[in-house]
Image (cartoon, rainbow, N blue to C red):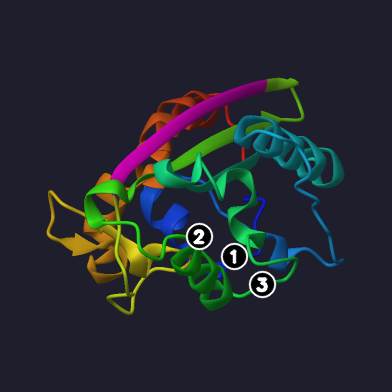
């Protein structure tokens, strides 16, 4: 199980974990609605909370992540509240608009930021829990660029690539993104579990 309803996130995870022999399911595949509340103060605590809850409810090996954007000039905001920065149920556009408003007048060289991702995997059969992390550094532009990705991707410029996350092909994004880095680390954990015949 992948504890997410975010289709963009699920596609990225599916692409990264291809070939491991797991059949991936998202929360959309469950017969009943499952609402996960992210009310912890750290990415790690949120990821573990979601993975534990879904693993307990489904009995399946579960991967969950919590990820977000940390902007230096804003003291690390939006951080764990990245998905609801502009309020509960806020759209990507609304969150991006609020971020740009808060950074209005801040010069480009002071708009450094990092995407961070913490992933947890919980095996309900053994009770084992593993956590891995990934990060990617960049700069927040003054206006969005690109049509790919989701969330803050159109504003997050990666200097080494000369593009925003939203301008990168998915394969290239997965090589350098915070989620891609975390998934790379997670692959080793999942290989171990696949070797023991776990399914999820």
**Outermost front residue:** 105
Q: Quadrant of the C terminus?
A: top right
In front of the other: label 3 or label 2?
Answer: 3
Label pair 2/1, CB-CB below 8 angstroms: yes
Q: Residue 5 falls in which quadrant of the image?
A: bottom right
Q: Which mark is residue 90?
A: 3
Earlier sequence position, callout 3 versus callout 2: 2
Q: Is 192 above or below relative to 29?
A: above
Between 141 and 47, the one lying in front of the other is: 141
Between 52 and 179, the one lying in front of the other is: 179
| Residue that label 2 marks | 9
Q: Is 79 above or below relative to 192?
A: below
Q: Main secondary structure of the magenta part?
A: strand
Q: Judging from the image, what secondary structure is the residue with disc 2 in?
A: helix
Distance from Cα at disc 3 to Cα at disc 2: 17 Å
The stretch in magenta equals 129-138
Q: Is residue 191 visible?
A: yes
Distance from Cα at disc 2 to Cα at disc 1: 5 Å
Q: Judging from the image, what secondary structure is the residue with disc 3 in?
A: loop
Q: Residue 188 falls in which quadrant of the image?
A: top left
> Percent x, y for residue 167?
24, 70
Neighbour tally class for label 2: few under 14, some 14-19, many 20 plus, Cα within 10 Å:
some
Q: Residue 45 falls in which quadrant of the image?
A: top right
| Residue that label 1 marks | 6
Left or right of 114? Residue 53 is right
Q: Judging from the image, what secondary structure is the residue with disc 1 in?
A: loop
Between 11 and 192, the one lying in front of the other is: 11
């Amino acid at each position: 199980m992948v504890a997410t309803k975010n289709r963009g996130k699920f596609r990225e995870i599916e692409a990264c974990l291809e070939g491991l022999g797991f059949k991936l399911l998202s929360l959309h595949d469950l017969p009943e609605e499952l609402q996960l509340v992210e009310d912890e103060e750290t990415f790690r605590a949120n990821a573990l909370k979601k993975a534990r809850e879904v693993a307990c409810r489904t009995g399946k090996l579960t991967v969950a992540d919590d990820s977000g954007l940390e902007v230096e000039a804003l003291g690390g905001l939006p951080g764990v509240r990245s998905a609801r920065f502009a309020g509960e149920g806020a759209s990507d556009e609304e969150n991006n608009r609020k971020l740009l408003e808060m950074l209005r007048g801040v010069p480009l060289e002071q708009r450094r930021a990092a995407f961070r991702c913490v992933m947890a995997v919980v095996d309900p059969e053994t009770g084992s829990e593993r956590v891995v992390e990934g990060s990617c550094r960049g700069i927040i532009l003054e206006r969005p660029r690109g049509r790919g990705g989701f969330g803050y991707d159109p504003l997050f410029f990666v200097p080494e690539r000369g593009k925003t996350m939203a301008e990168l092909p998915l394969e290239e994004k997965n090589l350098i993104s915070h989620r891609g880095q975390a998934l790379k680390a997670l692959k080793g954990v999942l290989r171990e579990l696949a070797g023991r015949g776990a399914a999820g």
